[in-house]
């Protein structure tokens, strides 16, 4: 039997205190201090084990410390780790070729964080609009969706509609229009001759794992073709196997002109991102017009190549499909018993809490007390995105814990964590 009440443990208290005193408070983590991890499991500083059902928001698609990825990193650490792009190195070209072949694209622009990949795609789209489409100087516009999440830079939060992400960061970058997600007619009405691109998540992650209506992306593609507008899909969280296909947009039978990739591309080891897509679009960049000191570094490329190798056989995508169907079926059994809806695709599920349960935070804390790590998004959705290496039995264990927590929460008001202490916020 696990001992709950992590916050009363000495070592845990120590590290929570240090974080609180010395680290900027831009996150509100669960009170679990992780010291070691392996596959789908993490161990805290008290020696307790937890099933990781979040997987670093998809940065850990292949689990913690996947042996192939660690081996690739260790091998490259013994050779060369950084050259800057002032020189060539022997990992960049192979990485770009292998990633392009995996994603069925023609060219790769390597960057580091996801936000940088999105920024890069936006810059490329504007340049393409002026140089190829013929939009008058300074007039290019980009359409985004309500509820979007594309990162945290100033330009990216400029087109966010989340007050928490945007408040007190003005003035914002101009040139963006917003339409409701999943509404092709609204998109059609928003396109003007100055529209350079449409930027969309194939499934909106932070918004609560929202899957658009069937046929939406086919219609978006048709509109983009009709009006000479680029379709950019942000696959930073949804891509690289998460939904059961290499790219989440593959489910829609549609190709984007540019895709942003990140998170899992770094194998959970280091930040690696990329814009991949059409040669005639990425080809607008000439030397000196965009760059990054760390983008495409040898260590990043070596790890990225190992990630591509893991995805090339389709085994990971297959695991996501098969185990994802199982996860959705098991979570679906809880609809009416604490959950009101389960959304998503593959090993990616948004479990909507029944309104009477209120906030997801105490539920996440009670789950942590039972050895299962998840995180709420937008207060009332629990996000399940386990590593694709998780087993069916582990999924069952996590869902059984959730059922227990929901049962307890259902019979207590206000929600109380499993250990009896009032739920902290
Ligand atoms: C996480 C995420 C980003 C930002 O990635 P960072 O590496 O945190 O900058 C962008 N888009 C989507 C869809 C994401 O999930």
Image (cartoon, grey):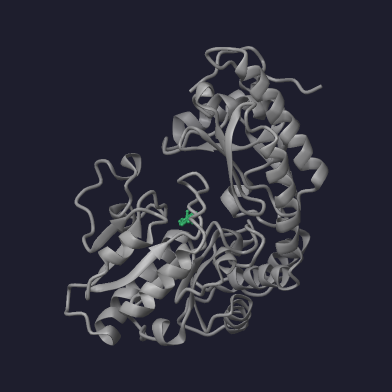
**Observer-nearest of 45 and 99:** 99
Q: Residue 365: which quarter of the image?
A: top right
Say left or right for 112 vs 47: left
Identify the residue at image location x=58%, y=59%.
270
Above or below, 12 against 148 in this view is: above
**Observer-nearest of 310 and 215:** 215
Above or below, 398 against 363 in this view is: below
Residue 96 pos. (x, y %): 57, 80
Which quarter of the image is occupied by the N terminus?
top right
Residue 292 visible, this orientation: no
Q: Residue 133: which quarter of the image?
A: bottom left
Above or below, 378 against 407 in this view is: below
Number of dots carrying numbers: 0
Identify the residue at image location x=38%, y=64%.
199
Say left or right for 119 vs 350: left
Say left or right for 47 vs 271: right
Residue 87 pos. (x, y %): 50, 84
Above or below, 335 against 125 in this view is: above
């Amino acid at each position: 039997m696990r001992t709950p009440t992590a916050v009363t443990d000495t070592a845990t208290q120590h590290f929570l205190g240090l974080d609180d005193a010395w680290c900027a408070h831009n996150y509100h983590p669960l009170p679990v201090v992780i010291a070691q991890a392996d596959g789908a499991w993490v161990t805290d500083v008290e020696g307790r084990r937890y099933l990781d059902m979040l997987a670093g928001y998809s940065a850990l698609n292949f689990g913690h410390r996947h042996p192939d990825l660690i081996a690739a990193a260790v091998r490259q650490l013994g050779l060369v780790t950084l050259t800057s792009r002032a020189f060539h190195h022997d990992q960049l070209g192979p990485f770009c070729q292998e990633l392009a072949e995996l994603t069925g694209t023609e060219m790769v622009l390597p960057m580091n964080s996801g936000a940088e990949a999105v920024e890069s795609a936006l810059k490329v789209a504007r340049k393409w609009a002026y140089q190829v489409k013929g939009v008058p100087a300074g007039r290019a516009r980009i359409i985004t969706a309500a509820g979007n999440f594309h990162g945290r830079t100033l330009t990216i939060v400029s087109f966010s509609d989340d007050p928490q992400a945007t408040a007190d960061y003005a003035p914002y970058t101009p040139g963006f229009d917003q339409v409701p997600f999943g509404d092709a007619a609204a998109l059609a009405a928003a396109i003007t001759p100055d529209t350079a691109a449409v930027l969309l998540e194939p499934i909106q992650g932070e918004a609560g794992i929202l899957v658009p209506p069937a046929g939406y992306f086919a219609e978006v593609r048709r509109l983009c073709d009709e009006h000479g507008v680029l379709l950019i899909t942000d696959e930073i969280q949804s891509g690289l196997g998460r939904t059961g296909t290499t790219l989440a947009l593959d489910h829609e039978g549609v190709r984007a002109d540019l895709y942003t990739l990140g998170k899992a591309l770094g194998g959970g080891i280091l930040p690696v991102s990329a814009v991949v897509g059409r040669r005639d679009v990425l080809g607008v960049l000439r030397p000196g017009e965009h760059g990054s000191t760390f983008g495409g570094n040898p260590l990043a490329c070596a790890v990225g190549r190992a990630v591509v190798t893991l995805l090339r056989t389709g085994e990971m995508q297959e695991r996501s499909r098969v185990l994802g169907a199982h996860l959705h079926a098991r979570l679906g059994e809880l609809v009416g018993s604490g959950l009101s809806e389960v959304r998503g695709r593959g090993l990616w599920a948004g479990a909507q809490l029944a309104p009477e349960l209120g906030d997801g935070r105490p539920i996440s804390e009670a789950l942590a007390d039972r050895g299962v790590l998840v995180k709420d998004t937008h207060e009332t959705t629990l996000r399940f995105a386990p590593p694709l290496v998780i087993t069916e039995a582990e999924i069952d264990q996590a869902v059984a814990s959730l059922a227990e927590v929901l049962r307890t929460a259902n019979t207590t008001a206000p929600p109380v964590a499993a250990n009896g202490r009032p739920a902290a916020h």
